[in-house]
Image (cartoon, helix red, strand yellow):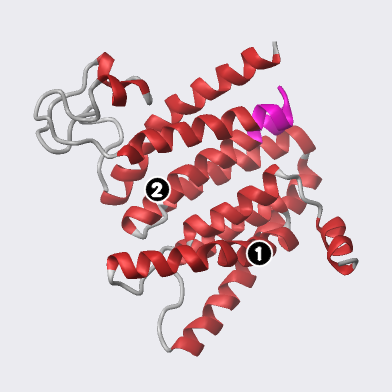
Amino acid sequence: MEIYYMITFFILGTIFGSFYNVVGYRLPKGESIMFPPSHCTNCNHRLGPLELIPIVSFFIQGRKCKSCHQKISWFYSFFEFSCGVLFALSYYIFGLSLDLLIALTFISMLSIIVLSDYEYMIIPDEVLLFFGISLIIEYLVRDGLMSTGEHIFHGVLSFFIMWGIKKFGDHLFKKESMGGGDIKLMFIFGLVLGCPLAILSIFIGSVIGLPISLILVAKKNSHEVPFGPFLSAGALILFLLKVDFNSFIHMISNI
């Protein structure tokens, strides 16, 4: 039965991942996420049912558009596969519970943010607002009003700490050191992880991001690198590993 549920959540994740692809590419450009329906961005060919099966269609079509034969990037299928894995992993970790719903909400938000920030260096406010409200409602149902208030307090505190880091970076580098979306994103991290782990996610994201940033700078010949994907990776690692801050500090102190 466990395998059945994991396969089900994997398939569900690929389906949602396909939709998040659309959201991540269209929303930053101010386009509707519903209209026009999914189509080839090269020839505007409207995709049929067999062309919309996550991952599978990519291989059925020989990795190219059925109409104009333009090559389709592997990234779409990789993104769908990653969402499927994260959905299945969330079920494995949290089981059928409200914690699972929170995990899927958090993962969904991060998936869209990674895509939009990497592609356009934009973290859409609409995404943060929608998923932020959704998470608060889920915490209200799971924990009640008082505990949810604590979650919100941690989110606000994380927001202002990140704002302070940005101001220090602006002063140090004499230019904007990070975007406003990264600061707003930190509110969600504080809400979900608590302030100490939200701040820790910054350092983990920085460690992950340094070698990748060097590659991107060399590849794009630009010194502007989106920080949102690295922040998201750091937060996701802490969240899925269920890291407890006090236990983490105790472990570090014993090294």
Residue sitting nearer the eye, 109 or 111: 111
Q: Residues within 10 Å of mark 2 (few under 14, many from 20)?
A: many
Which residue is at 70% across, 52% downward? 193
Left or right of residue 249, residue 131 in this image:
left
Query: Residue 115 — which label?
Result: 2
- Residue 158's disc is 1
Prevalent SS, magenta region? helix
Residue displayed at 56% across by 46% down: 132
Among numbered discs 2 and 1, the one appearing first in the sequence: 2
Look at the image and tell me in which quarter the C terminus lies. Answer: bottom right
Checking the image for residue 116, the label placed there is none
Q: Position of residue 91 (x, y in %)?
A: 66, 27
Residue at 65% from the left image edge and 32% from the top image edge: 90
| Figure check: 108 above or below 9 | below
The residue shown at (52%, 82%) is 169
Question: Which image quadrant for residue 39?
Answer: top left
Mark 1 residue element: helix
Residues rendered magenta in the picture:
90-102
> Which of the 4 image quarters holds residue 222?
bottom left
| Rendered location of residue 243, percent (x, y) | 77, 50
Q: How far apart in space, not on screen, are marks 2 and 1 (Cα)?
A: 23 Å
